[in-house]
């Protein structure tokens, strides 16, 4: 496994690599969800490249950036065991050198949900992902469905800018109690960890209501809010039942819908989603 810290070295390491090249872009603190992506890439691709970079431009809260979990050596051991061929670990200076002044402005699909609650987040995401794509030049890139809006934003960017990268969504990996795996889960204390599965319970409630024939989206949203509000440590950012293609909030569930939530458990903000239809 080759470990590269510069763009030039990463490109050199991938010269003549067997195609397709599959990329898994991470911010480190790897867990089983990340490894699911790596294994999918290993299954489908001749070469697998992973990146580890905590991108500062997608964090609005600098204290959140400072507290983000890091463990490079542990991550490298895991990636080596999974048969990754190349790992790219750039510095901030490599990704944003002095004078850096070009940014990707995402479109409408980036405006609701996370776009409202984390202004500028997707601008940072798109800019760093474009730079990583241009550096690693993958044929395929794998992302977890937990970050559904992010996938939609990146897929739109890849299509609009003719990047030639197939953006692949992989089903969310969950704990036995339904909690979606996330690097942020490590920040939960015992009581918060016991509370956190309420996100999945609320999403399952939405699925159950839809299966029973409920088509009024506001009734579904209200039921989910009530489910979450029953937990004293949980604070709702948003509960959404939106068109799965546009993310416009639905009045009637008569088209495939993305049901998504963002909830703070104590001071840790978690997101999750399920698809209806």
Image (cartoon, helix red, strand yellow):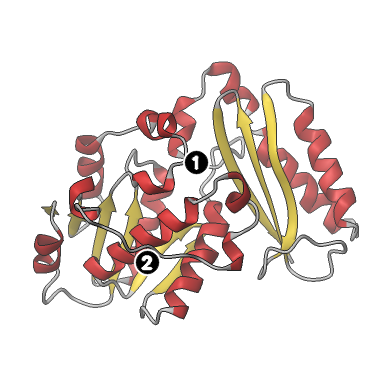
Q: In the rendering, at what x and y percent does residue 124 appear?
A: 41, 54
Q: Which residue is rendered at x = 65% and y = 56% of the image? A: 112
Name the residue tied to disc 1: 181
Q: Which residue is rendered at x = 77% and y = 53% of the image? A: 207
- Mark 2 Cα-neighbour bin, 10 Å: few <14, some 14–19, many ≥20: many
Which residue is at the front of the view, 214 or 236?
A: 236
Q: Which mark is residue 120?
A: none
Which residue is at the front of the view, 200 or 58?
A: 58
Note whether 230 is above or below 108 in the view shown: above
Q: Which mark is residue 141?
A: 2
Q: Does label 2 or label 1 sit earlier along the sequence? A: 2
Q: Looking at the figure, which quarter contains the C terminus?
A: bottom right
Q: In the rendering, at what x and y percent does residue 266 appear?
A: 59, 23
Distance between mark 2 and mark 1 Cα atoms: 19 Å
Which residue is at the front of the view, 34 or 94?
A: 94
Residue 145 visible in the picture: no
Q: Left or right: where does residue 115 sit relative to residue 46?
A: right
Note whether 232 is above or below 261 in the view shown: above
- Whether residues under marks 2 and 1 lie with C-beta atoms below 8 angstroms apart, the answer is no
Q: Which residue is rendered at x = 32% and y = 75% of the image? A: 139
Circle 1 — which element? Answer: loop
Residue 130 visible in the picture: yes
Q: In the rendering, at what x and y percent does residue 35 appear?
A: 36, 50
Circle 2 — which element? Answer: strand
Q: Left or right: where does residue 118 sit relative to residue 35?
A: right
Q: Left or right: where does residue 154 sit relative to residue 237?
A: left
Quarter where residue 88 is shown = bottom left
Q: Which residue is rendered at x = 20% and y = 41% of the image? A: 77
Note whether 221 is above or below 159 in the view shown: above
Q: Looking at the figure, which quarter contains the N terminus?
A: bottom left
């Amino acid at each position: 496994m080759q470990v590269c810290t510069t763009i030039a070295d990463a490109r050199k390491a991938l010269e003549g690599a067997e195609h397709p090249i599959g990329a898994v872009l991470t911010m480190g603190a790897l867990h089983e969800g990340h490894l699911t992506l790596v294994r999918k890439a290993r299954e489908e691709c001749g070469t697998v490249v992973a990146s580890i970079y905590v991108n500062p431009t997608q964090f609005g809260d600098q204290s959140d950036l400072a507290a983000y979990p890091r463990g490079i050596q542990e991550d490298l051991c895991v990636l080596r065991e999974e048969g990754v061929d190349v790992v790219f670990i750039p510095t901030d200076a490599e990704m944003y050198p002095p004078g850096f002044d070009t940014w990707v402005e995402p479109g409408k699909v980036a405006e609701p949900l996370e776009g409202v609650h984390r202004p500028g987040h997707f601008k940072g995401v798109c800019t760093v992902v474009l730079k990583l794509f241009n550096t690693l030049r993958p044929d395929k890139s794998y992302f977890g469905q937990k970050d559904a809006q992010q996938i939609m934003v990146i897929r739109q960017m890849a299509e609009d800018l003719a990047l030639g990268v197939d953006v692949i969504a992989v089903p969310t990996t969950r704990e036995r109690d339904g909690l979606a795996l996330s690097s942020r889960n490590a920040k939960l204390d015992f009581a918060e960890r016991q509370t956190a599965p309420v996100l999945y319970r609320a999403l399952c409630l939405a699925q159950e209501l839809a299966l029973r024939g409920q088509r009024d989206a506001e009734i579904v949203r209200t039921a989910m809010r009530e489910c979450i509000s029953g937990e004293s440590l949980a604070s709702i950012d948003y509960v959404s039942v939106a068109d799965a293609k546009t993310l416009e909030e639905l009045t009637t569930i008569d088209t495939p819908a993305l049901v998504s939530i963002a909830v703070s458990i104590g001071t840790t903000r978690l997101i999750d989603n399920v698809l209806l239809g």
